[in-house]
Structure formats: C-alpha cells, structure tokens
Amino acid sequence: MEENETLDASLGAKKAQEEALNDIENANDEASLEESYNRHLSKKGKISLLMNEMGRLAKEQRAAFGKAVNEAKQKAIAAYEEKKASFAKKKLAERLEKEKIDVTLPAKAKKKGRINPYYKIIDEITDIFLDMGYEVVEGRDCETDLYNFELLNVPKDHPSRDMQDTFYLEAPDLLLRTQTSAAQSHTMKEKEVKTPIRMISPGKTYRRDDDDMTHSHQFAQIEGLVVDHDISLANLKATLELFAKKMFGEKREIRLRSSYFPFTEPSVEVDVSCMNCGGKGCAMCKGTGWIEILGAGMVNPKVLEMCGYDPKEWSGFAFGLGVERVAMLRYGIDGIRRMYQNDVRFLKDFE
Ligand code: PHE
C-alpha cells in the first residue's frame, strides 16, 4: 500500500467532514436537517461508508485513518445536535409568542356567592363552643307538646305558656317549636345511659308575634346545655363571659340579672357591656351601657328529674341566645327582617 493512498484516505475523511458540516450548517429547517443527517451520518451515510475503505489501507495506516473518520463523525454529530436544539428553541419561542395571553383584556365579571349572615353568625357561635368542647345537636322544627313544654316544666295549664304564643299544627300535641330548649329535653331524655352533656343546638323557632324591627314570627336560637356533677352558676357565668369576649371583643363584660324561666332555677338574663360605647351609654344601649343577649339559668331539678337525670347526683346550666340579635349586634345590622328579606343589595353589602 502506498503512502499517498493513506493521505488520500485521510483527506477523504476531512473532505467528508467539511461537506457534512456545510450541509448541516445550511439546513434551514428540521426536515432538511434530517436529510443532511441521513446523507452523512446514517448507516449508509457518506461518513459511515468511509469505513469500508479501511480494507484498502496498510495495517499500520488504518489507525490514523480510523481516527480521522471518527473525528469527522463526532464533529458532524455535534453540529447536528446543536442545530437540532436551536430549531427546538426557536419552535418553542414561536409557540410562546403565538399563545401569549393579553392580560390587559377586560375579564368577564363572575358573580360570587356569599355566606348569608344568618349562617355566618351560627358558624361563628358554633366554633366558639366547639373550641370549648361542646358538641352540636340537631333539633327539629316540628315538636311535640311534651318536649317543647311539659318536660321543660311547663304543664298544660301553666301561665308561662302565654309567654310564647304558639303555632299549633292540626295533629294533636304537635306544634312548631317556640324555643330551641326542646333540644334540651330531647338530649337528656333520650340518653339511654345518663352521661355528662355539653351541647349546643342551633335552629329555627316560631312564635305568633307581630313582626317589627326587633320581632319576627320566625327567628333562630342557639340552645346550650351542660349537665355534669357539681355544675354551678359560676360555671355558667365563666362560660358566657368567655363567649361574650370571643364574640364581641376582649373588653366586654357581662352581668347577670335575675329573671324567670320555668325550666331553670335560678334564672338569669345576661347582658353584655355595650360594644358600641364601651359601657358609657349611647343610643344603641339606650343609655344603660348594657345590652341583653340571652336568657340562661341552672337547669331546674324538676326538669332533670323528668328527663331521667337524678338531681341529687347531677346539676347543669342552660342558655338560649337569639341568633338574629347577636348577628345584628355583631355585624351592625339595623333590622331583624333584613335577615330574611333576601335583598341582594343588603347581602352584597354585608361582606
Ligand atoms: N328558651 C328561652 C327563651 O326562648 C331561653 C332560655 C334557654 C332560657 C335556656 C334559659 C335557659 O326565651
């Protein structure tokens, strides 16, 4: 084998390399780049075919030739990869440009629903008592005379029935409950094994009242009931004070005034220091510095007894608060009927 034949062969490799690089360089789209690849680098490509010439060379010259071909191949592959990546980059940039979103275009306004103040206040109150370890008991709107009155120490001819003018239903002894206190009697009576109770029960109540700014024939209450061993009025006061502070602010205080409910003994009316004037006296608290928020008391031993809790062993307290009243005070709502009228302007404002 002649010396210059190797030279020829190596030159051939150099030439093939240049050709391939040129071709790849000139490819101006992906398809022509692939064609260049096939032409030079695929199994039947020009660079690959160079290897067939190896046989014609003297043994000691083969290494140099092989090296030249390999170098041509590596360089062409590198150029091909680089070009391919640049095409991909360009393509992505074009796509991003095309799919650009104009964020300055006006959007379609979406109407968002809101929680009605009625449910919002119930949620807030419920959360406060859940934090204190109470459970929520579901009551029923349609009650029997037994649970709404008799088990709560209001026998049929009792004058206190006049305090709550009742909607009676056609079926005997059925009525729309006048107070969520019916959930007290249910909870105590229906416990098969008499265990301690810590519950609240929110729900609607109904009375034959004439509707005005502060009265409605339908309103909501939240009943609370705690029964255990050695429950005292101090427990009631501490609980309601904590509630008042969480609901109306750390600075609020409460006071108990003696009152009467057939199912509690003693009974109290609970006032909270005015959240508007801080107790100095204003129009909202009618100059007194106090605002009544609920009725409460120690569960009457007669009620405990009728519901199966031995009053020698058990004692408890109960309270009932007006949901709308608390909502009006908390959110500054100016009339109880706003809570039912479903006036969208009010509901929108309310947030
Ligand atoms: N049920 C009473 C009412 O509707 C409120 C109340 C509940 C009072 C529990 C004492 C204890 O006026």
Image (tube, rainbow, N blue to C red):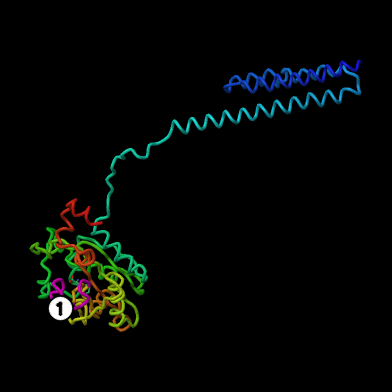
Instruction: Give the vertical position of 142 relative to 81 (above or below).
Output: below
Q: Residue at x 22, y 80 (%)?
A: 255
Disc 1 C-beta below 8 A from ligand 1: no
Q: Nearer the viewer, residue 71 or 114?
A: 71
Q: Residue at x 15, y 63 (%)?
A: 334
Q: Residue at x 20, y 74 (%)?
A: 277
Q: Nearer the viewer, residue 232 or 257?
A: 257
Which quadrant does the N terminus fall into?
top right
Instruction: Provide residue 57's location: percent of width, then percent of height.
Output: 88, 18
Determine the image quadrant of residue 300.
bottom left
Q: Is residue 279 magenta?
A: yes
Q: Nearer the viewer, residue 161 or 23?
A: 23
SS at mark 1?
loop
Instruction: Provide residue 113's location: percent of width, then percent of height.
Output: 27, 49
Badge 1: how crowded within 10 Å, few (<14), some, or many (20+)?
some
Q: Nearer the viewer, residue 262 or 330?
A: 330
Q: Is residue 77 magenta?
A: no
Give the magenta range.
275-289
Determine the image quadrant of residue 222.
bottom left
Determine the image quadrant of residue 109.
top left
Badge 1 amino acid? Thr
Quick check: which quadrant has ligand 1?
bottom left
Residue identifier under label 1: 288
In the rendered structure, the answer to whether residue 288 lies left or right of residue 124 reads left
